[in-house]
């Protein structure tokens, strides 16, 4: 075996999770070329990881033009991969797999197009460890290769350079934020409206966090500025005095470095939370009603990583409902997900991780 291709188009969380496949393959086959195919706009998150695998960017033009996609797939065919692991399994990857002459083609079991693959993997429904389903499922993709499980890499990681950390520290100094005092990042806006905790509820959470002796950063992108301002304005005046609203990163790498300076991160589920976990930062995640917590609640231990979902508190609201129905009712359900449901758990998280942070200094 000379070459392996791992395919993981999708967003940052998925790209981070599937790095464990590349890392494991590099450990198991140190003399084999491992290539990692990901969307171009997600490359920055792992660009400094110094892995032994190569990153192949899937450009936007391949998504916009089927002819460009086919030409790209044909160029990959010339690489003569021995093994392809397709963790994406959608039309884009089907074309790449279908045109490839790889002898081993692995993906998850779906009704279509199973004939493209030599090995189809079933996904179990209940997590067997605190790694979480999404990680357990990825590792199952390695089973047809019969790799010694002692070689498995189970935790995604992100490397932040010394210069990036220094730039983040300078940003904190610019905004008069004390690095020696707890810094909390609030992930106040989700990647989409249906993954964003309601404004008034989020403001209450920030008010609750601000009862502690902390400095608060709000994570938002330029196109989320108006929502972030709404949340800020809904906070109490005492809380506002602890929020450094303009202390934001100007890039994805900048965000990683800023996260690396934080004591812990609280807020909406999404890429930011997955990045925080890869940086070994404590996380408290509020899941949207339509997201399956069981899949993405990785490394849950009741201390360093905790997540909450409306279904934890009001399971009757979800009984006999399809995902389509839940999505349709998402806004209504989100509004019913009151902060008071989980403030005791949030208190436990904050106190535990503030104590741990101080004990390390």
Image (tube, helix red, strand yellow):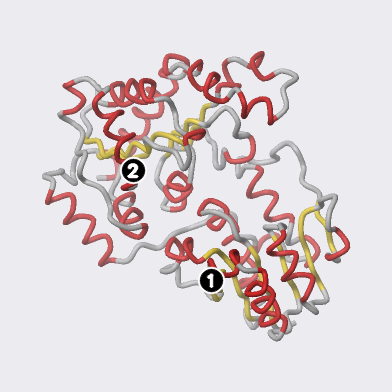
Closer to the camera in the image, 208 or 350: 208
The residue closer to the viewer here, 102 or 282, is 102
Relative to 88, is 67 above or below?
below
Q: Secondary structure at mark 2?
A: loop
Q: Position of residue 302 (x, y in %)?
A: 50, 30
Report, in whole angstroms, how far the alpha carbon at label 1 lies from the one at label 2.
Answer: 25 Å
Q: Which mark is residue 48?
A: none
- Judge whether 165 appears above or below 223 on screen: below
At x 53%, y 71%, the residue is: 57
Q: Identify the residue shown where x is 77% and y is 42%.
A: 124
- Number of numbered callouts drawn: 2
Looking at the figure, which quarter contains the N terminus?
Answer: bottom right
Relative to 97, 13 lies left or right: left
Residue under circle 1?
Answer: 57
Q: Callout 2: 10 Å neighbours few (<14), some, many (20+)?
A: many
Element on which disc 1 rests? strand
Q: Position of residue 181 (x, y in %)?
A: 19, 39
Task: Examine the image and state in which quarter residue 78 appears.
Answer: bottom right
- Characterize the local packing of mark 1: few (<14), some (14-19) or many (20 or more) Cα atoms within 10 angstroms: some
Label 2 belongs to which residue? 220
Q: Is residue 139 above or below residue 179?
A: below
Q: Quadrant of residue 297?
A: top right
Of residue 230 and residue 311, the one placed in the foreground of this image is 230
Name which residue lies at 70% across and 80% down: 74
């Amino acid at each position: 075996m000379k070459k392996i291709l791992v395919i993981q188009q999708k967003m940052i969380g998925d790209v981070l999770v599937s790095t464990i496949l590349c890392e494991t393959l590099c450990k198991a086959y140190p003399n084999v070329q491992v290539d990692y195919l990901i969307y171009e706009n997600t490359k920055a998150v792992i660009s400094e990881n110094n892995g032994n695998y190569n990153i192949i960017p899937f450009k936007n033009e391949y998504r916009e033009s089927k002819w460009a996609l086919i030409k790209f797939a044909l160029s990959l065919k010339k690489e003569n991969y021995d093994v392809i692991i397709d963790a994406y399994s959608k039309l884009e990857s089907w074309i790449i797999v279908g045109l490839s002459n790889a002898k081993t083609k692995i993906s998850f079991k779906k009704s279509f197009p199973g004939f493209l693959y030599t090995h189809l993997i079933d996904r179990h429904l209940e997590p067997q460890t605190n790694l979480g389903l999404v990680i357990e499922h990825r590792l199952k993709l390695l089973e047809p290769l019969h790799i010694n499980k002692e070689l498995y890499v189970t935790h995604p990681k992100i490397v932040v350079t010394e210069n990036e950390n220094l730039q983040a520290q300078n940003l904190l100094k610019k905004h008069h934020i004390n690095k020696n005092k707890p810094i909390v990042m609030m992930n106040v806006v989700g990647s989409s409206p249906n993954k964003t905790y309601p404004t008034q509820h989020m403001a209450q959470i920030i008010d609750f966090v601000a009862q502690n002796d902390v400095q608060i950063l709000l994570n938002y992108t330029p196109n989320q500025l108006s929502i972030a301002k709404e949340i800020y304005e809904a906070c109490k005046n005492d809380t506002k005095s602890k929020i450094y609203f303009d202390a934001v990163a100007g890039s994805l790498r900048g965000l990683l470095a800023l996260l690396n300076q934080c004591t812990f991160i609280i807020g909406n589920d999404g890429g930011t939370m997955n990045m925080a976990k890869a940086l070994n930062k404590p996380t408290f995640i509020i899941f949207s009603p339509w997201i399956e917590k069981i899949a993405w609640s990785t490394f849950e231990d009741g201390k360093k990583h905790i997540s909450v979902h409306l279904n934890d508190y009001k399971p009757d609201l979800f009984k006999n409902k399809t995902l389509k129905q839940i999505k349709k009712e998402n806004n209504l359900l989100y509004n019913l997900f009151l902060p008071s449901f989980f403030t005791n758990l949030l208190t436990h998280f904050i106190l535990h991780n503030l104590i741990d942070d101080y004990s390390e200094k």
